[in-house]
Amino acid sequence: MDKNFALFDRVALKVQGRITPYSPTAIADFASGVGRSTTSPLFERVRRERGRWASKIRSGSTISAGKLAVWDNGVHGSFEIELVVNPIRTLGHLLDRYSYGEIADLSVIDFFDRREAPTARDLTLDGNDNMIADFLAFSGSMHSTQVQRVAEFLRLFEDRLQARIIEDLCPNDLGYAISIDSGSAVAVTDDARVELDWSHLKISQCEVCWEWHDSNALARVHALADAAITSARSTEVNFYGRPTVVRDLGALAVRLPLSSNVSIVVYAKAQDRLRLEVRYPTALNKFVGDRLPSSRRTLSMDTQCYELRRHPVLRGVSL
């Protein structure tokens, strides 16, 4: 299983920023400007609560959820953004409307725009839209093409996400001049300097997935489910945790716990689509901390891969 074509499904992340005021009202002015962009604002207008300004993500984008908090610390201001993003869902929505070669040239607003009736929703067995509808067209006929495109898209997704945030918080129509590099994004007006510190991005939850086109996807998961039910009676499996078999609408899924915080899920995402996910629901840094870069932390980091065939439930099952 090649980590180089692993895509991210659900990712929960946190990023912080700093406001350097040049006037007495600069921090309050920054907060009051949130949600006032004239072009598809990402955040709602702020509200004052418990000594801070707070906002949340508007609907209408492929960013699943998020919130913003802004504090006036006296000498300077600070803010924190928590987001739940889904790169594979975003890519699916993009490829419904554009060719792969076109998406790099889109504006940050169009990049995260959500299609109201995504094709994937009609194809998935669980009724969700976090899938690339035409997987073969995206991945190409060569393995190297898929590896290259996955790497390109993850870098592009991260760059666009950073730009989408800073351009929404500090829009040009409010007088901000923005500059972005690999580690931070800076916006400046006559009244303040706002810095989004992307170099200390924190990822708390993550789902890493591999996907294959397979005309026998359902049959393979049924075979795995039978193996899981059999293995659940053995003490060897209980050492890892008890496997579970779940049906979510039409999608049969087998969950294999590796620890209290990590599990593998194998399921037929569609009639002809087999997906394997490694889910880190909490404490991601505990499990992949040694693989995280020491300086800049990114979404496109190397993700730790487990030797799945050592798990007793997968022995003798062809995936």
Image (spheres, rainbow, N blue to C red):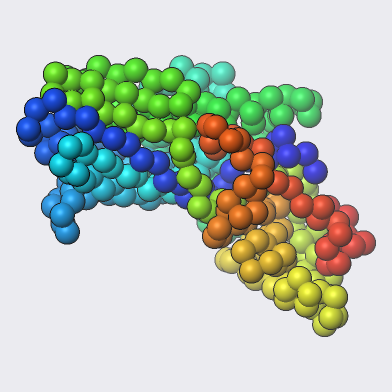
Residue at position x 15%, y 42% from top? 74
* Viewer-side residue, 98 vs 202: 202
Give the image location of residue 79, x and y in percent.
28, 42
* Relative to 164, 308 lies left or right: right
Instruction: Look at 62% across and 47% down and name the residue there.
Output: 289
Residue at figure coordinates x 80%, y 43% from the top left = 1
Residue 273 percent coordinates (x, y) = 70, 48
Query: Would you say residue 44 is visible in this rendering?
Result: no
Looking at the image, residue 102 lies above or below residue 137: above
In-front residue for pair 286/210: 286
At a point 64% along the width and 69% down the height, the residue shown is: 260
Occupied quadrant, residue 41:
top left
Horizontal placement of 287 versus 83: left or right? Answer: right
- Answer whether residue 179 is visible to the viewer in this image: yes
In terms of depth relative to the viewer, which is nearer, 95 or 317? 317
Kindly give the residue lying farthest to the right in the view shown: 316
- Give the percent coordinates (x, y) of residue 123: 59, 49
Give x and y (percent) for residue 213. 74, 43
The outermost residue toward the left is: 24
Marks counted in the figure total 0
- Looking at the image, residue 65 sits to the left or right of residue 223; the answer is left
